Amino acid sequence: MFHSADTVVSMMFNRQQTTTWIKLQQAVKDMIKKKFELRDLGRIKHVFPGAYVYRQERGIPTYDDRIKSTDYQLTIEPILTEEECDRASDEPRKLDSGLLVMRRHHFHLQLLSMVKHHHK
């Protein structure tokens, strides 16, 4: 689930679009063919808290009749450190495939560490 969510967030981030929970949920659900719920996002945050910034924002345009642009929506933005973004300052930051692999590896190590600690 993390791999799919990170892929979707990176694609939207690279296109300079705002990633909302509704967009992320539908895209991940289509990718993995399973439910992706807020509790799954909470689990990702628990294992890798430095992966994303989570905000409640409003005024985000939607193309869904059920959601008004004045409603609050959960937005997800990846956290990139300066070491990860060794580009010139005038270029927009991008999440490329190398960074995605590093983030997936970090998530895996964090999860493995939690399992080892639990089994101890």
Image (tube, grey):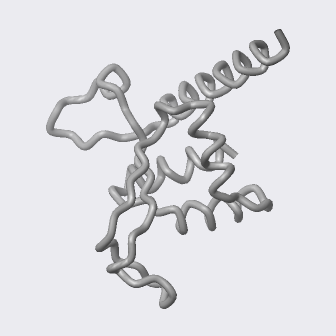
Counting from the top left corner in percent of width and height, residue 25 is at: 61, 62
Counting from the top left corner in percent of width and height, residue 8 is at: 55, 53
Identify which residue, 39 or 23, lies in the foreground: 39
Is 109 left or right of 48, judged from the image as shown?
A: right
Counting from the top left corner in percent of width and height, residue 110 is at: 64, 21
Q: In the orientation shown, which residue stands out farthest toward the left?
A: 90
- At x 32%, y 79%, the residue is 70
Identify which residue, 95 or 22, lies in the foreground: 22
Is 43 left or right of 54, judged from the image as shown?
A: right
Is 44 left or right of 69, judged from the image as shown?
A: right
- At x 79%, y 61%, the residue is 33
Counting from the top left corner in percent of width and height, residue 77 is at: 40, 48
Give the vertical position of 94 relative to 38 (above or below): above
Please count the marks in the image: 0
Q: In the orientation shown, which residue stands out farthest toward the bottom?
A: 65
Where the C terminus falls, by quadrant? Answer: top right
Give the vertical position of 16 relative to 117 (above or below): below
Give the vertical position of 94 relative to 86 (above or below): below
- At x 68%, y 59%, the residue is 37
- At x 62%, y 31%, the residue is 47
Q: In the orientation shown, which residue stands out farthest toward the right?
A: 119
Identify which residue, 46 or 19, lies in the foreground: 46
Figure quadrant of residue 32: bottom right
